[in-house]
Image (spheres, rainbow, N blue to C red):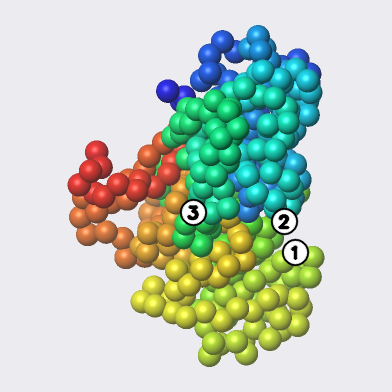
């Protein structure tokens, strides 16, 4: 069974793969699982550049099981991973094997069907990690190859593939983006002192990693309190392959007259989500370039489900929730967070200082949110913890 760290499977952006330099000296692996693992690693190189498409990696072996080509889906609208890998292999692909992390497409979209390229290359065997749930594929690519006499094996590394493209699959299934919540806290679980001082709890290395993440998501979401307290810019520095829409959630529509977000609203996409009765409070922001979006409310304030539906309609695939604690609490209370990144700094704050997640919370420990695929890593002076919210019902969780 393929076991990869979350750095590979969900796109946790670390230098181990960010610094990978492509050469023609392909790796030497001895098993199918190792080749598929390499394909998963390649797929991550497209993270942030291909959405709302999936990230996909591919490896081609010749008839002697030597690697002769590799590729990944590098940009939205560009050639798919299989096409890149087969082009690199050329005639050496004939009679060989193709490993690919997601089912090859069989329809004309922005590019021709990958199945045509595979058949033209003369590949005799295709190993697929996961069926593509996209309705125009959904098993059709595999059926097309098998009908042409290609041996197709499905399921090697399936669990890893499901995690790797969980955001893509969620957008197709639910029409909503994958929500990643991030916060930094002290050893005693505080995000600021009792006076509100919070800069900086986390290390420079942790903050650099968050900037890399910002450059690969579709939106960065904060609440009104964060804007007033921190005056954030909410951009990736340095810039990444994506420019995230900065989303400010404020039921009251009360925001500072002067702040970095308003000052730069024409430079970076800025969306303010508020309630219809308070639209007039934001006319100045709108004049300065921000988009004002009215949203219904529920007992938590702005209806989180409605917000995510709106972002999903805009084909946003991954969004980053940066706080503050009230907004984080609303997302957790409504079960709308999929993944968490937590940076724990070796500091003690004490006292009546704020904690990361407010909201209602749960009444019993058996109701507490659990996590799967949990990974920890030291980054700078901090401990970086990340995991995916468990989809199992409480009675099945350990």
Cα distance between the residues tagged 3 and 1 = 26 Å
Front tag of 3 and 2: 3
The residue wearing badge 3 is 170
* Residue under label 1: 268
Q: Nearer the viewer, mark 3 or mark 1?
A: 3
Q: Which residue corresponds to mark 2?
A: 243
Residue 232 visible in rendering: no
Marks 1,2: beta carbons within 8 A? yes
Say above or below: 261 vs 199.
below
Q: What is the C-alpha distance between the residues marked 3 and 2?
A: 21 Å
- Residue at 62% of width from left, 66% of height from top? 314
Q: Where is residue 162 in the image (x, y as percent from the top left)?
A: 47, 40
Q: Which residue is drawn at 47% across and 80% down?
A: 296
Number of numbered tags placed on the structure image: 3
Q: Who's the residue at 46% across and 60% down the image? A: 174
Q: Nearer the viewer, residue 277 or 263?
A: 277
Q: Which of 254 and 279 is in front in this view?
A: 279
* Crowd tier of the residue under label 1, counting other residues whose Cα lies within 10 Å: few below 14, some 14–19, many 20 or above: some
Pick the quarter of the image with the N terminus: top left
């Amino acid at each position: 069974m393929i076991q990869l760290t979350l750095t590979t499977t969900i796109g946790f952006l670390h230098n181990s793969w960010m610094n990978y330099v492509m050469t023609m000296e392909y790796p030497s692996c001895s098993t199918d699982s190792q080749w598929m693992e390499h394909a998963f690693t390649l797929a991550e190189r497209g993270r942030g550049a291909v959405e709302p498409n999936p990230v996909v990696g591919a490896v081609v072996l010749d008839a002697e099981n030597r690697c002769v080509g590799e590729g990944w889906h590098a940009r939205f609208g560009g050639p798919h991973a299989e096409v890149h890998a087969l082009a690199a292999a050329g005639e050496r692909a004939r009679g060989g094997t193709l490993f690919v992390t997601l089912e090859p497409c069989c329809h004309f979209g922005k590019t021709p069907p990958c199945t045509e390229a595979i058949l033209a290359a003369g590949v005799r065997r295709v190993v697929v990690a996961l069926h593509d749930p996209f309705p125009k594929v959904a098993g059709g690519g595999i059926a097309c190859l098998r009908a042409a006499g290609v041996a197709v094996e499905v399921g090697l590394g399936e669990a890893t593939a499901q995690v790797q493209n969980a955001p893509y699959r969620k957008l197709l299934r639910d029409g909503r983006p994958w929500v990643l919540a991030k916060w930094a806290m002290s050893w005693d679980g505080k995000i600021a002192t009792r006076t509100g001082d919070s800069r900086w709890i986390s290390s420079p290395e942790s903050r650099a990693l968050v900037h890399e993440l910002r450059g690969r998501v579709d939106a960065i979401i904060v609440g009104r309190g964060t804007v007033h307290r921190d005056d954030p810019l909410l951009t990736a520095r340095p810039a990444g392959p994506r420019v995230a829409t900065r989303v400010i959630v404020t039921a009251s529509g009360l925001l500072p007259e002067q702040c970095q977000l308003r000052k730069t609203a024409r430079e970076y996409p800025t969306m303010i989500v508020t309630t219809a009765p308070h639209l007039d409070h934001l006319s100045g922001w709108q004049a300065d370039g921000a988009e004002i979006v009215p949203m219904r409310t529920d007992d938590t304030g702005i209806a989180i489900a409605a917000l995510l539906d709106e972002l999903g309609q805009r084909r946003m695939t991954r969004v980053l929730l940066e706080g503050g604690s009230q907004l984080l609490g609303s997302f957790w209370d409504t079960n709308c967070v999929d993944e968490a990144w937590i940076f724990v700094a070796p500091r003690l704050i004490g006292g009546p200082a704020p904690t990361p997640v407010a909201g209602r919370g749960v009444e019993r420990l058996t109701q507490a949110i659990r996590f799967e695929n949990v990974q920890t890593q030291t980054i700078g002076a901090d401990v970086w913890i990340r995991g995916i919210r468990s989809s199992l019902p409480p009675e099945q969780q350990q």
